[in-house]
Image (tube, helix red, strand yellow):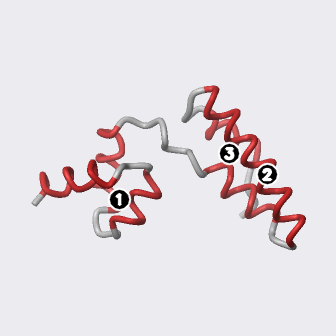
Amino acid sequence: MKLDWDKLREATKGQMPEKRWKHTLGVVETAISLANRFGGNAEKAELAALLHDYSKAWQTDRMERIIRRKACRRSFCILTKSFGMRMSELGRWRRSTE
C-alpha cells in the first residue's frame, strides 16, 4: 500500500498546535537529511519524524481510552513512548484498573 503523504501530513498537523507542527516539520527535514547523509531510508525517516509527536498534545483521558481499547497488554515503555504519557500517569491509570 502506498502512503498518501498529503493526507498523512494533514492528519498529523490536525493533532497538534501550530508550534508543535513547525517543530515536527523541522524534525522531518533533519531526519531526511541524516538518512540521506548516512545511507538510511529517507522515506522511513520522514514517516518516523512526521509521527513522532502525533499524540503529544492529546489529553490524558483520550490516551487512556485508546490504551484500554487497543493496547492494554503492551509494555509500559512502549505505551509511554507511543502515547506520550508520563510513567506516573500510566502507573496511576494501571492501578485504577486493577
Q: Which of the two residues, 10 or 79, is positioned nearer the viewer here?
A: 79
**Could you tell me residue 51's position as x and y percent?**
61, 50
Is residue 1 toward the left or the right of residue 57 in the image? right
Is residue 63 toward the left or the right of residue 52 in the image? left
Pointer 2 local density, CA inside 10 Å: few below 14, some 14–19, many at least 20: some
- Name which of mark 2 and mark 3 comes first in the sequence: 3
The residue at which mark 2 appears reads as 30
Residue in view at x 81 percent, y 48 percent: 29
Q: In this view, does 87 lie above or below 60?
A: below
Q: Which of the two residues, 32 or 72, is positioned nearer the viewer here?
A: 32
**Could you tell me residue 12's position as x and y percent?**
62, 40
The residue at which mark 3 appears reads as 8
Pointer 3 local density, CA inside 10 Å: few below 14, some 14–19, many at least 20: some
Q: In this view, does 41 lie above or below 15?
A: below
Q: Is residue 7 above or below residue 33?
A: above
Instruction: Measure how far apart labels 1 and 2 are at the Cα level.
Output: 32 Å
Label 1 residue SS: helix
